[in-house]
Image (tube, rainbow, N blue to C red):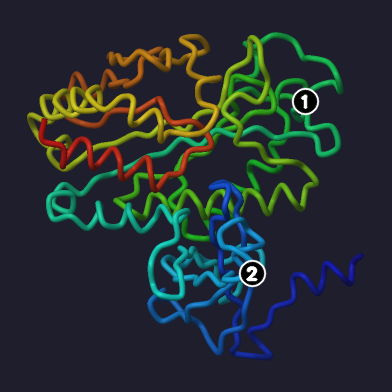
Amino acid sequence: MSLLTDLINLDLSGSTKKIIAEYIWIGGSGMDIRSKARTLPGPVSDPSKLPKWNYDGSSTGQAPGEDSEVILYPQAIFKDPFRRGNNILVICDTYTPGGEPIPTNKRAAAAKIFSHPDVVAEVPWYGIEQEYTLLQKDVQWPLGWPVGGYPGPQGPYYCAAGADKAFGRDIVDSHYKACLYAGINISGINGEVMPGQWEFQVGPSVGISAGDELWAARYILERITEIAGVVLSFDPKPIQGDWNGAGAHTNYSTKSMREDGGYEVIKKAIDKLGLRHKEHIAAYGEGNERRLTGRHETADINTFKWGVANRGASIRVGRETEQAGKGYFEDRRPASNMDPYIVTSMIAETTILLKP
């Protein structure tokens, strides 16, 4: 095993200029992260300089067997924390051979919204709070929970320390450092209310980069849990009953909101979000109705309401924003399994482009 470890950690820089590029894309379910690697002649830092590639879409639920080729377009580059050196992770989106985005490519539509002049002028910032649950591999039950049983009730686990309260911290800290190494703008981590559940935050990130960074962070977390022999779940309500669900609260601001008088802009934006509540809920993650019940720090899925410092609201405005008269707000509706390309672009579209 020591030889295997040595080979995994082998530094190639002294023997070749070639690098390994891991091409990453989203599969047919919208949450299955796929990847494969290729050798390139030398270091690359600009995604437009990377070659397009292809894969068998019939094996990912994205193309029929008789016309299975799907083309990968490189869109964002991150340093590879697993192979290190000049090796890279490449976030890609997916197209037909004719150059049309395939139906599961949500990045292409988001890029159109983020390239709209009105959106560009507002420089939208996002901070996404990605919650997730770590499961024991063979029983699909939360890490640290007795098999077939339950731990003590919620209360002592949020942001806690101790072997009887925090389960999986080695995975969480490994992920934190790996994301920083990769160049992802990860801004923090914390243990969550339900034991075995954790959160990391990405941002502030501008426009389409928020989605690229969150997908890259999810991929890295999948790889780390793979190494650890633990299952990663983005289910918005992994355990039924009196246990918190998992969300992806999305913090948002525009240039106008961050400037003096921005609080009035924020309130108008929230009013617009209320007008499209049903449309947003429909796009905010599968199974979200199991999470948005009006309990466990959520608003009921059929009700739109906002408030200052109210964690039971659809939209929460912080005390600091209210007092400063400018700042940001938090959309608490997105589920943990949401697509960040859909959620971030939809918020921008509704708050900036919608003319009621």
- 203 up-or-down from 252: above or below: below
Residue 52, percent from left and from top: 48, 78
Q: Which residue is mark 2?
A: 36
Which of these two is toward me, 294 or 150? Answer: 294
Q: Which quadrant of the view contains residue 252? A: top left
The residue located at (55%, 66%) in the rendering is 89
The disc, 1 or 2, on the residue closer to the chain's N-terminal end is 2
User: Which residue does the image show at 86% across and 19% down from the upper left?
Assistant: 148
Q: Closer to the observer: label 1 or label 2?
A: 2
Nearer to us in this view, 40 or 35: 35
Q: Is residue 76 left or right of residue 305?
A: right
Q: Position of residue 265 (x, y in %)?
A: 12, 29
Q: Residues within 10 Å of mark 1 (few under 14, many from 20)?
A: few
* Residue 261 x/y as whole percent: 7, 29
- Label 2: few (<14), some or many (≥20) within 10 Å? few
Left/right of residue 277 with respect to residue 102 in the rendered view? left
Q: Quadrant of residue 2?
A: bottom right
Of 318 and 333, which appears nearest the observer? 333
Answer left or right for 355 relative to 61.
Answer: left
Tell me the tag on residue 163.
Answer: 1
Amino acid beneath label 1:
Ala
Identity of the residue drawn at 78% across and 26% down: 144
Which image quadrant for residue 154? top right
> SS for tag 2?
strand
On screen, 37 above or below 42?
above
- Specify the quadrant that holds the C terminus: top left
Mark 1 to mark 2: distance in Å?
A: 37 Å
Instruction: Indicate left or right for 77 with 145 as reference.
Output: left
Q: Most extreme residue toward the front, as rendered?
A: 66
Q: Amino acid at mark 2?
A: Lys
Instruction: Kindly state the secondary structure of the residue where label 1 is placed.
Output: loop
23 over 136 or under it: above or below? below
